[in-house]
Amino acid sequence: MGIFIILVCLIFAYFAYRSEKLWYNPATIMLLVWAFILSMYTMRLYGLYEVKTKVYLIIAVGLLSFFAGYIITSSANPVKYVHPPADAEVEDNEKINYGILKICGLVVLAFLTEEAIETFILLRSGVTLFDIRTSLQGYAEYDFSEQLTSLRTAVGPLYTWFIMPVYNALLIMFSIDFFSGKRDKGLIFITLGCLLMKSLKEGSRVTILIFIIFLIFSMAIEKESVVVSKQMKAKIRYGVIILLVIMIALSIIRISQGKKSLFEEIYLYFACCMPLFDKSVQILDSSVWDMHTYGALSMYGVLQLPVAIISFFNNHIMDWYNAGKDVINELETFTEIRISDHSAKSNAFATYFYYFYRDAGMIGVILGSTAFGMVATAFYKNLKRKIVNGLATKRAMYFYLLIIQSLILSFVRIYFSVASFAFTFLYAFIFISKKKVVEKKEDTEEDTDTDSDTDTAVEAVE
């Protein structure tokens, strides 16, 4: 059944590409990602468990629903070139607020540098990067665990509502500024500094992967409206290669304490989500209790701020919302994904399908995936419309890059369940200002014996 789903994904992905004439449309991205994930799992290397037929059914229904959402939004919201009125000139301006962006970036850089120094001190004392990472993620407790998280504990919710969203925004703004901005040297220094400090602190590869995604797709999108020189393409190519080398180096350091090879580590990174998804579905289906979360899981990050405001006034957090948090913590538990001869455990990578399935079963998968497809396509169409009509695209591209991240990493989770991801959308309105200038020509007549004069009225709309 897996091979059949792969073939259908490829056919539908090609259909979407032919329809849009752009390969970075949401349907093509999502379907190609899952064709790749299923292809990796179908090989079943290193003794991966064989998943049940129901898992394939959920995935098939989820992908078809996502594609249906794409079709619905595309049909209802076609992209057309809009001719400006003959008597008006519209100039759509967007400006990167470099000052605010760099001030916020310096605060984040200082925070991440302090955290990285703590990690460096521990590494010098003989603690491994593997132990540091497992401690940070809450998988194990060590004598140094409290020291690692002391700064995050001190800032409290600001880590989720400011530090991480601004960090995410820096990666996006760097990508936008590199192709359609002034390539601000201060922004480049701050962004790369934050990336390196965070990678050192956590030994994280996904942060580098996300940055690579932003760079590649920014270049692809900007090619539609600006000329990307060969020199610029070469810089991006070399930059991506360097980032990939850093990712490989981090992987080697992290597996040095274990028994896995580098290829095995990379393979399991993409294929482990299938047995993890299967185990999670089995646990849910075997329960005699109603374990559905009714939106609290998939929308946990989006709901965090309104729930925090409500709880501030009534001094009580809703049990329904807490159920979503409990499931997120539950998914962090390590689970066996391979047969005993190749015993190994993984966690977290439950796929976005499970989040919707946990919310409301198969109905949740259908409704959630359809809504996901509609939302992703709406952001894409907004960006495409601006490109076609020659309007400013910075804020639209900012939003769509976040959507692309959620599509490519859908084999991990639905990213709207992550509060820092949801808050990153809001910072677009702080770091990118928008002004629309409309110039209208008005004819006035003083009387029948005088010539008409043309006055120009300029109106600025923030």
Image: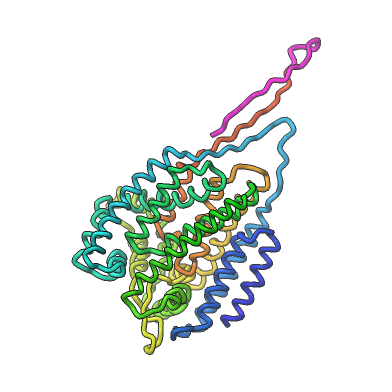
Q: How is the image coloured?
A: rainbow
Relative placement, left or right, of 392 versus 252 is right
The correct choice, above or below, for 51 with respect to 169 in the image is below
Quarter-wise, where is residue 35 in the image? bottom right
Residue extending farthest top: 449
Residue extending farthest bottom: 341
**In the image, residue 447 lies in the stretch drawn in magenta:** yes
**In the image, residue 378 lies in the stretch drawn in magenta:** no
Q: Which residues are magenta?
A: 445-462
Residue at the spot 28% in from the left edge and 52% down from the top edge: 114
Percent x, y of residue 206: 43, 63
Residue extending farthest left: 143
Total labels: the figure holds: 0
Q: Nearer the viewer, residue 64 or 216?
A: 216
Relative placement, left or right, of 330 versus 180 is left
Percent x, y of residue 97: 47, 39
Relative placement, left or right, of 324 versus 15 is left
The correct choice, above or below, for 446 with respect to 357 in the image is above
The correct choice, above or below, for 23 with respect to 158 in the image is below
Q: Nearer the viewer, residue 104 or 64?
A: 104
Percent x, y of residue 227: 64, 48
Residue at the spot 65% in from the left edge and 53% down from the top edge: 77
Residue at the spot 60% in from the left edge and 55% down from the top edge: 220
Percent x, y of residue 57: 54, 78
Of the 4 image quadrants, the one containing the N terminus is bottom right
